[in-house]
Image (spheres, rainbow, N blue to C red):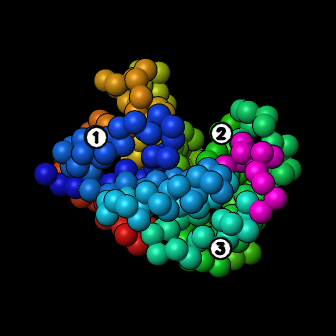
Amino acid sequence: MTALTDTHAHLDDEQFVSDLPAVLHRARAAGVANILAIATTAASSSACIALAESHATLWATVGLHPNNILEAEATAWDTIAAAVVHPRVVGVGETGLDRHWHNTPFAIQEEYFIHHLELSRRSGRPVVIHCREAETDMLRVLRDDYDRFGPISGVMHSFVGDAKMAEACRAMGLYLSFAGMLTYKNAAALRATAAQQPLDRVLVETDSPYLSPVPHRGKRNEPAHVVHTAACLAELLGVSPERLAEQTTINARMLFRI
């Protein structure tokens, strides 16, 4: 069995408090060799690092989700910036822009997104990018960063954009990661976009405990379920599940240096 990498899972979420060892056991049994524990707050960043220190298959990111900025403590950013050098930290984020929810004024979201991009460059850790209903603004900020500093090391997580958005992101150096939505009946447009992507620029993820793929839709998601998204993406790209697993794991290792 070729090993898979789940590049985005919120394993510090309270939904995993009671059975995380069993969750990780099922992931290993499903062929998931590495999982990125993705942070959303300063406390979450510390929790993800602790998980990565305790489990050899886990790696951590540090960052502040756009919807969590206003609730953050005054020292949150300093905590995140200091933690990025930890040897188990392989990424900066989850950061980005969100116009679906209105937890944080958009100007503040943009300010912190730029901070994360700067931290990514300084630390050499790739940036993990959240974009929800903010594609135009996202491309504007990314293009400004790209024009000033060159290629951006990072990933558009849980990508749901169109082919034009995908091409623009790839042109700036970013990978595209596909989650469980790829398997949904109403996601024909997303599947059409995914089918056009080069194999060496795609990743797979669960976004656990959210976005469970078919046939687990409506239930708690977990890293073992990434096999369903990977199988769907493999079919769209015309390769075997084994080839898809091999290449997406190579891609993840190249990007996150794991």
Residue of label 3? 82
**Residue at the spot x=43%, y=20% of the render?**
218
User: Residue 12 vs residue 70: left or right?
Assistant: left
Determine if residue 108 is in view.
yes
- Give residue 201's position: percent from left, percent from top: 42, 59
Residue of label 2? 132
- 77 is within the stretch colored magenta: no
- Give residue 200's position: percent from left, percent from top: 36, 61
| Label placed on residue 158 | none
| Amino acid bearing label 3 | Ala
**Residue at the spot x=27%, y=50% of the render?**
32
Quick one: label 3, few (<14), some, or many (20+) residues within 10 Å? few
| Amino acid bearing label 2 | Arg
**Residue at the spot x=78%, y=37% of the render?**
103
**Residue at the spot x=40%, y=36% of the render?**
18
User: Residue 23 vs residue 210: left or right?
Assistant: left
Quick one: label 1, few (<14), some, or many (20+) residues within 10 Å? few
- Give residue 39's position: percent from left, percent from top: 56, 53
Q: Tell me the element at label 1.
A: helix
Q: Tell me the element at label 2.
A: strand
Determine if residue 195 is in view.
no
Q: Are marks 3 and 1 in contact (CB under 8 Å)?
A: no
| Label placed on residue 22 | 1
Dominant SS in magenta: loop
Kindly report which numbered mark, 3 or 2, lies closer to the viewer in this rendering. Answer: 3
Sooner in the amino-acid sequence: mark 3 or mark 1: 1
Q: Over which residues does the magenta segment extend?
A: 65-75
Along the line of sight, the residue nearer the viewer: 61 or 140: 61
